[in-house]
Amino acid sequence: MENETLPLDPAADTSAAPFFDPAAFNDPSTWIVAAVILSLLVFSGFFSGSETALTAASRGKLRSMADKDDRAAKGAQKALDLKEDNERLIGGILLGNNLVNILATSLATVLFTTLLGEGAIVAATLVMTALVLIFAEVLPKTYAITNPETSAARIARPIALIIALIAPIVAVVRIVVRAVLRLFGLRIDAGANMLSVQEEIMGALTIGHQEGSVEKEQRDRLLGALDLHERTVEEIMLHRSGIEMIDADDDPQAILSQALQSRHTRLPVFRDDPENIVGVVHAKDLLRAIDRLTRGKDAPGLESFDVSAVAMEPYFVPETTTLDDQMRQFLRRHTHFALVVDEYGALEGLITLEDILEEIVGEITDEFDTPEEPTLLPDASGNFTVDGAMTIRDLNRAAEWTLPDDEANTVAGLVIHEAQTIPLPGQCFAFHGFRFEVAGREANRLTQLKIRRL
């Protein structure tokens, strides 16, 4: 039996649908949709750049701009107002950005379906991803991040208007978001800042020093001023073992000689026991009193000198007083000298206004101070020989180290705390990434230590 060829149905269309329809280009609606998509991409870039500018802009720089009498001042003030409620700001920008992105993608799918037919979805996805990534995300964000304060001041007012228009929707979104976060035990305060102003400044100074734009001396001075309220007088006081005192029962000649030979202007005066401080004598008051007793025909002579009569009343402060508070007290009381006592009233040391200022500006020396030898010169083995009484803070600042000072104030105290004993000369320890060797000890005090980084 021979094969027979079946007749084709003339009504059946066996050709595939065209991949590209040239007639669609002549349709005005195609160009209208394309123009709308481009406009939405512009809005998307505006929202993306606004988000970056407003979140990256520094409050301090915006405040400086707002205080100036120029065109950017009102925009900077509006940007500051928007940053007061970051949750509302970000919610409004993201809502607007997502609306225009989704709408642009949907219109692009319709447009490419009209032009390409079956391959529309893949083409629309690829083209819109490239357009959104380049022109609506990377480009505006890069522009905004180069000068966020200026960009924030320029776009603050239109963004504020848009957020005001979509405020009801943003409010609903915030309620939903907070309800979901509350299920996980998180509560959001719209006005809360993640970092305090002080922490932000300290972080900026540290980064600036690492990048080379801030000198070490500038960083140390600014950081020293910022953390005065976190440090106590106990950390920087002169220990009682190093205090030079006058015995009130000494011979006047001996007292005068001691005062003249001392490099200090103020000296504490004790009677019977060094713990029993009865006053503080100033060198000028001492010389005036001796001048009255020794000059003139009727002068009684130096033998009648009583140091207690010229000594000022001692000023005692607790060891837990912060440096910030103590500096205020010095300024209020018009004095520069205080004796530090512990919770039981026992003498611990002394502190002066100069000690506090040195925490900010560094070591202050005058013509009567003995020059100190360099304490941070490494030997052939890389060891730094330091005085055991050197504070950890000073060591960290001088050597750019990060030894902890939570448990001890001095280097010797840190070694004793970590070793849990008073080590002998020659003993070595390794902790916090450093090697410590006891180089000198007097009684129970570590006088010298050799330190090198492991």
Image (cartoon, rainbow, N blue to C red):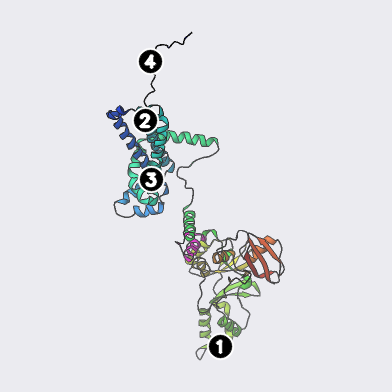
Quick check: 361 left or right of 27? right
Q: How many C-alpha atoms fall within 10 Å of the one at disc 4: few (<14), some, or many (≥20)?
A: few
Please state which amino acid type lies under the numbered disc 3.
Answer: Leu
Q: Quick one: SS at disc 3?
A: helix
Please state which amino acid type lies under the numbered disc 2.
Answer: Phe
Quarter assignment of residue 245: bottom right
Q: Which of marks 2 and 3 is nearer the N terminus?
A: 2
Q: Name the residue under label 4.
A: 12
Camera-near label (3 vs 4) is 4
Extreme residue in the front direction: 2
Give the residue displayed 41% in from the left and 29% down from the top.
119
Q: Give the range drawn in magenta.
A: 211-228
Q: Main secondary structure of the magenta part?
A: helix
Q: Earlier in the sequence, mark 4 or mark 2?
A: 4
Residue 301, label in figure:
1
Q: Quick one: SS at disc 4?
A: loop
- Can you say which quadrant of the picture contains the C terminus? bottom right
Camera sees residue 318: no
In the rendered view, tell whether residue 192 sits above or below residue 34: below
Extreme residue in the top direction: 1
Q: Do the residues labelled 4 and 1 touch (CB within 8 Å)?
A: no
Total marks in image: 4
Residue 112, label in figure:
2
Q: Mark 3 points at which residue?
A: 139
Q: How far apart are marks 4 and 1 (CA)?
A: 138 Å
Camera-near label (4 vs 1) is 4
